[in-house]
Image (cartoon, helix red, strand yellow):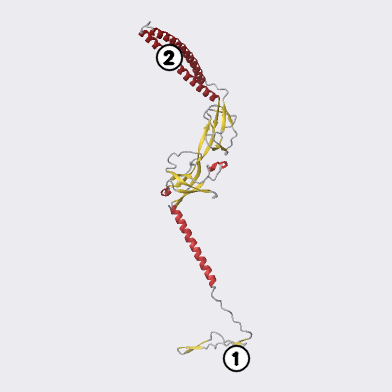
Amino acid sequence: MNDSNSHPGRVSAVASPPARSTRTGTGNRLTSVSPLCQPVEPKVVTGALVVEPKAGPPSSRRRLFFRCARLVLTGAVVAGAGAYVTHTFTSATSEQAYINAEMTVLRAPIEGQLRLEPVQPGAVIFRDATLFRIENPRFGNQEAMAQLNWLRELTERLHAEADEAAVRYQQQEQVYRLHEKLHEEKLISRLAFLEEETKLALAQTALSNKQSQARQAEARTREVERQVELQKETMVQMPFDGVAWTIPAKTGAQVAAHEPVLQVIDPRRIWVDAFFHEKYSPKLRPGAPVTIRALDGRETWHGHVESIRGGVGRIAYESFTAGLPGDFTRRRVAVRVVMESNNPFDASQFFGVGRSVVVSVNDRE
């Protein structure tokens, strides 16, 4: 028997037969070709037979996981691209926008020394609250004083003339009654009686006119006196509930007439000025809803377009608290936005006036 059958633990290596030499005849000569390899002697390997396992196919769960991941990633990319395209074609975002407000300047009505009340910028001021006083103890307006003196003299003269007219009327009334009795007794003619009656009517008319002129002169005198007193000392009150923006004048300073003393902001007159490129003009229309967002992204509120103005940089633009910068490029559209939601900024932050924001207009509707 063969040794491989009697010893299962042994495997014999059978060598391949040795390569035979070949001869090639060329003409009458024989060329001997040596073998390519030398014959290998059979070797016998002893020991246990080891069979290496073959690598199997990858797990089905792993293939399913990676397949799902690829599908989810592809869907996310497609959805993001669709959202970007939709946002690009249906919405517009401002290149520059800021919160603006209408400022009211309170001026000194007269010249004199300023006495400011304890008012600080950013503090809420209620309506009819006293803001400042102006005193002018050295008032010497010659024109106003001359007018006042003339009115006083006129009033005194008219009162004197009215008193004279009253005395003349009383005397004429007595004469009229006497002539009336004589006429009843047929002692005077009717013509003489009518003359006395006419004199009485004229005296009464003159008395009424003098008294009316005296009253008008008194009223004018009181008005001029009040104006003169205002020229000596005056007080200015808050016209509405608002906040002080700035106080350029200082208490105790000498101010001239109509000089700015205080600047206040009405919280009811606050809006947003946004500037868009002209290519977004078809998406901008009055009444369109907008979203207003702070630059830091913490605050977001809503509003709508109130007006649209073109020609920014080419046509003179109105100025408010926050003005258009001079180096802003042309070909822009100015959009005024009315805030519908409550202003997220309080009085201590000046209601956000002057802050930069981002305005987005969605044209899906």
Q: Secondary structure at mark 2?
A: helix
Q: Secondary structure at mark 1?
A: helix
Say which quadrant the N terminus sits in.
Answer: bottom right
In this rendering, the answer to whether 136 lies above or below 51 is: above
Mark 1: give few (<14), some (14-19) or many (20+) Cα within 10 Å. few
Pinpoint residue 326: horizontal percent, then vertical percent.
48, 41
Compare residues 203 and 83 and report the one nearer the observer. 203
Is 50 left, or right, of 357 in this rendering? right
Pinpoint residue 87: horizontal percent, then vertical percent.
46, 54
Compare residues 189 and 232 and report the one nearer the observer. 189
In this rendering, the answer to whether 150 lies above or below 348 is: above
Kind of residue at badge 2: Gln
Q: Residue at left 49%, top 61%?
A: 76
Pinpoint residue 104: horizontal percent, then vertical percent.
51, 35
> On the image, which quarter does residue 252 sit in?
top right
* Residue identifier under label 1: 5
Q: Given this view, does label 1 or label 2 mark the residue nearer the observer?
A: 2
* Residue identifier under label 2: 204
Sequence-earlier tag: 1 or 2:
1
What is the distance, in whole Å, between disc 1 and disc 2 at their CAs?
169 Å
Compare residues 50 and 118 and report the one nearer the observer. 118
Mark 2: give few (<14), some (14-19) or many (20+) Cα within 10 Å. some
Kind of residue at badge 1: Asn
Q: Residue at left 36%, top 7%?
A: 189
> On the image, which quarter does residue 250 sit in?
top right
